[in-house]
Image (cartoon, rainbow, N blue to C red):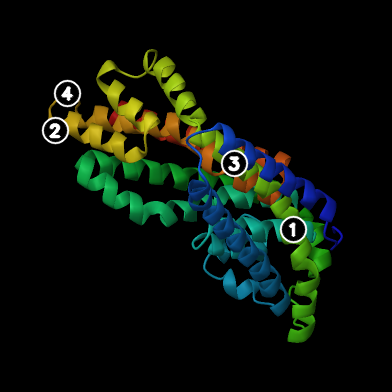
Amino acid sequence: MKQNKINYRNLGFSVLFTLICLIFSLIYFEKISLALCIKKLGIPLFRLIVFISIGLFAGQLIESLGWTRQVAVLARPFFRFSNLGNKCSAAFTTAFISGASANAMLLDFYEDGKISRMQLFLSNFVNQFPAFFLHLPTTLFIILPLTGKAGLLYLIITFLATVLRTSCFLVFGRLYLKKHNNDQIQIQADPTGKDEKKDISAILSKIKLKLPSRITNIIIWVLPIYTFVFILNLNGFFDYLNKSMSHFITLTIIPVQSFSVVILSFAAEFTSGFAAAGALMNAGVLSMKETVIALLLGNILAFPIRALRHQLPRYMGIFSPKMGLQLLLSGQLFRILSIIFLGTLYYMVG
């Protein structure tokens, strides 16, 4: 278990590095202003830290009050089957509300020695399932009006890909995390199979002792990484990367008719890609099947870059740079492989 001591020295270095980057950017980059920094950096950072803090607090409170089984009740059969346990199931339930809070809970359980590294990784991958539904209301009302049946097929394929990889992770957990050897850590922490209930004042004192240092250690990484990615993004680094990749890949694997769809998916938000796909399909340039394939290709090619742009600071900040990068890249790899597999099936039999 890590010491509950705030590292003021590293926090000072983190704040100093962030301030130097911001001052340099304000002086030398015309696109960056103080108002923009507050709107696009300050507010999102504050919101992220709040959600991380909520996740850490909720994880410790749920565990201390013995509510782990109650919170995990909905997904308990699946997590029992996969040997991931109630703590990972509780984080899965939390992921339907906030991915950052769920990841903070997993980190807290891991640092306290209540779940293993493999459990943390598998749980993070499985949490892509609630993440799909977390963003579904927004994407649903963008995709369907613009692309109709093709957009619906696209959503069905991406959902089935999510179900496929989630099932694979659960089966892997079943085979790898064997019950008789499944986290001696868990057995030590909970030998009777029941969570120990404690006095509320003792619980709050324990949380008060641990929470500030945990949050501070996360801020030390989140602050500079989030700021650095913000500066790169505002100066067009990720747009340049998107366009460079799209020009290379579209000339080799994507049909010429789908060229503009994928380019727009790269260069702008997905809304532009879906709008272009719908227009080309309605004009008869693309068939419905070609439109679905083009949208899947746009998802495969564009989403990893967006993940690096939006999720990299969060993952590296919450889990530490090394573990966060491993989680993000491996999670994206599994996501891409599942979409390629089902997209290929659709192409062959659809």
- Which residue does the image show at 76% across and 79% down from the upper left? 203
Q: Is residue 261 left or right of residue 93?
A: left
Displayed quadrant of residue 64: bottom right
Badge 4: how crowded within 10 Å, few (<14), some, or many (20+)? some
What quarter of the picture does the N terminus occupy? bottom right
Dots 4 and 2: beta carbons under 8 Å? no
Could you tell which of marks 4 and 3 lies nearer the N-terminus?
A: 4
Which residue does the numbered mark 2 point to in the structure image? 282
Mark pair 3, 1: CA separation: 19 Å
Q: Amino acid at mark 3?
A: Leu
Residue 152: % across, % down: 27, 44
Q: Position of residue 7 (x, y in %)?
A: 83, 55
Q: Is residue 12 above or below residue 267?
A: below
Q: Which label is found at residue 285?
A: 4
- Crowd class of label 2 (few under 14; some 14 to 19; many from 20; radius 10 Å): few
The answer to which of marks 1 and 4 sits earlier in the sequence is 1
Give the amino acid type for the residue marked by disc 2 in the picture.
Answer: Asn
Q: Are marks 3 and 2 in contact (CB under 8 Å)?
A: no
The residue depicted at 75 percent of the width and 53 percent of the height is: 116
Q: How many marks?
A: 4
- Residue 216 or residue 178, whichever sits in front: 216
Q: Where in the figure is residue 327, as x and y percent of width and height?
A: 64, 42
Tell me the residue that label 3 is attached to: 312
| Residue that numbered label 1 is attached to | 216
Q: Is residue 13 left or right of residue 157?
A: right
Disc 2 on helix, strand or loop? Answer: helix
Q: Residue at x 20, y 26 (%)?
A: 286
